[in-house]
Amino acid sequence: MEAIDLSDEKKNKITVEIYGQQYVIVGTESPNHIRAVAMAVDEKMREISNRNPLLDTSKVAVLTAVNAVNEYMKLKLEVEILREQLEQKD
Amino acid sequence: MEAIDLSDEKKNKITVEIYGQQYVIVGTESPNHIRAVAMAVDEKMREISNRNPLLDTSKVAVLTAVNAVNEYMKLKLEVEILREQLEQKD
């Protein structure tokens, strides 16, 4: 079991299972949020693995990370646009 | 080299290197966006690996995915709040 620390403030420590491995996730986020994140990663890994059955676990995980960062960056642009729209209305 | 398909529309096919491995990323996103995503994943993997030197590549990648999905979900909440604020101003 390995621990990852999601931030520096007051922390929750939650054990989750992702793709058959246990991880201790440490973060200020609520246990429910942490479990939802782990479940989303597990589901995405299984989806990518089903579509590419020859990939090893490490590559499945890297491509899951690529997918999540891609979605994050697109959402980040959306946040900037929404903030500009809000400012124009103030 | 493994390919991941980020969507179903008109596609770019870009070869990137992440954590010493080559990946072919296929997506509608611009080549620059895809390269930026790959670079962000590579950087995050190196950061997590430096903080936890005993982790194998697969676990480093899973924890990178956990981190990215966590940030994505928090940003998603922010988008919902911004949209509500915009609607109230209409």
Image (spheres, coloured by chain):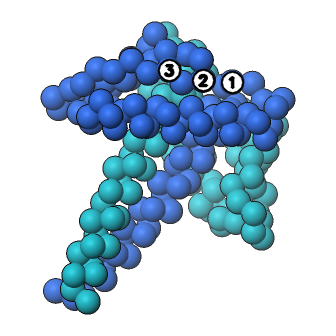
Chain colours: A blue, B cyan
Residue B49, position in %: x, y?
A: 48, 22
Q: Which mark is residue A57?
A: 1
Q: Quadrant of residue A86?
A: bottom left
Residue B33, position in %: x, y?
A: 59, 61
- Nearest to the eye among marks 3 and 1: give it: 3
Going from N to C along the chain, the mark reached first, 1 or 2, is 2
Which residue in the structure is indicated by mark 3?
Answer: A17
Q: Chain of mark 3?
A: A
Question: Badge 1: few (under 14), some or many (20 or more) residues near its Cα, within 10 Å?
Answer: some
Left or right, A85 with reference to B50:
left
Q: Residue at x 34, y 38 (%)?
A: A33
Q: Quadrant of residue A59?
A: top right
Q: Are callouts 2 and 3 both on one chain?
A: yes
Which residue in the structure is indicated by mark 2?
Answer: A19
Whole-angstrom CA distance, mark 2 to mark 3, is 7 Å
Label 1 with label 2: CB-CB less than 8 Å: yes
At mark 1, the secondary structure is helix
Q: Are callouts 3 and 1 both on one chain?
A: yes
Q: Are callouts 1 and 2 both on one chain?
A: yes
Going from N to C along the chain, the mark reached first, 3 or 1, is 3
